[in-house]
Amino acid sequence: MTPPASHLHGVRTLRVLSTSLLIFVCYFIIGLQLAVVPGFVHLHLGYSAVLAGLAISSQYAATLISRPIAGRKSDSAGAKQTVRIGLVVCAASGLLFAAAVRLEQNPWMSLSVLIASRLLLGVGESGVAAGATLWGIGRVGAPYTAQVISWAGIASYGALAAGGPCGLWLERSAGTGAVGAAAIALALIGFLWASALGAVRVERGDRLSFRQVLRRVLPYGTSLTLAGFGFGTIASFITLFYASRHWPNAGWTLSLFAGCFVVARLLFSGTIRRWGGYRIALLSLGIECAGLFLLAFAPAPALADFGAAVAGFGFSLVFPALGVEAVRHVPAQDRGTALAVYAAFIDLSLGISGPIAGAIVWARGYPPIFLFAAAGAALSIALVFKLYRARAVPAVVKSPAAALTVETRPEAARSQARGAACRELCAAAADEIATSVEVSTNASRHRRAENRT
């Protein structure tokens, strides 16, 4: 007896959540440290805000560089193994963080150890994020890739939002070193949880080179980079934008952006499977672009709040929608590498949008930065539309028996493929008719010859 669809849906969701929980643990550790590192470097060690920013950004640089390596490791050694290695590295990062706090009386040594801790955390993040996402896909199947990516995003952003306040609370109640101890404990708990989950099969076969994977993912990653300008700009400058206009509650605006982001992923991630990644990406980018325009021209905080909420709602599904289409272009044995390379483009987007937006603020003020982000979303729409028009279609059918064989051809070859298929089928039918006529004619001649004798 086949289980009801609701039961199967619940089982799939639990399987996805079991791996998404590992992503939550990793990003909760990141959130814990993210809240206290700037203050520790600037106020405790006495270094400038520039060095505090360097300590923060060193993790992002390590993540950007190590993501493709983690993806390839997931493909070759298995997702479970990669996640467990990533969690061990996160625990080592927490140990170095605690050591940096103990070395506070030697500021230069403390800063050096702290940056080493941040670099390790970036590497650990790559392993957990890439491995757990591929692990989730392996547990529920490739058709549910969009749901896995969506839950991974919910886990990561939710953990960052929860980790920050918890990090500040730990610092106030037990000292900065308690943040490192908490990171070690959480990473070890995550390691035990990962060890208890069943592994998925490692796909075998000839693997593409990294350059080949990058070439196939690049158009989708470029679209994601352009779309991410809105997120990076709002996260970095919304508080300064509100302060420049003497508007209150910029934190509420960020909460609206994040809340609508999560709601869209919870409610509408299934539409990607039903309607396709291209269509959802185009619709989502259009919504994001509209929200950014509202922010740029908002005359009052209420309209700016609404614009940020719309932008967050729109941006939410861009990542999973384009990710589904990017993964389609690589074989199963290279799926982890493709996901990791694709995810690296959002790191790139967040890394370059801040400096560009800062230069625009210096030259033209705050409102134009949202127009810059809207232009990025508009360019992303144009690129996604071009990819949508050139999407793969069935190739020419070589024979009636090969009608189920699917190759890829550009969209422009659709009519030509159909015409060639019809000609092949008609030719086969004509051959059958000619053969039948010939057999019938020969039989008639044979009967007449027998009658004469």
Image: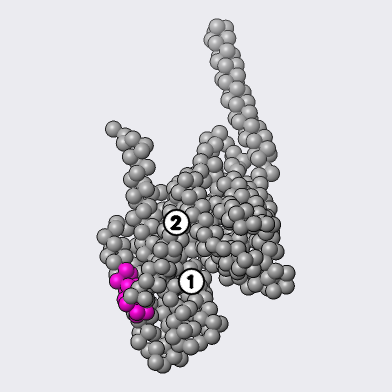
- From the image, tell me which residue sits under label 2: 154
Residue 297: x, y in percent? Answer: 69, 57
* Residue 4 pos. (x, y %): 33, 35
Residue 252 appears in the figure: yes
**Magenta span contains residue 105:** no
Secondary structure beneath dot 1 equals: helix
Residue bounds of the magenta highlight = 174-187
Count of residue discs = 2
Q: Is residue 322 above or below residue 415?
A: below
Spot the residue most to the bottom: 106
Residue 355 placement, left or right of 170? right
Does 180 appear in magenta? Answer: yes
- The mark lying in front, picked from 2 and 1, is 2
Residue at screen point 65% across, 51% down: 290
Q: Nearer the viewer, residue 325 or 26?
A: 26
Magenta residues: mostly which secondary structure? Answer: helix
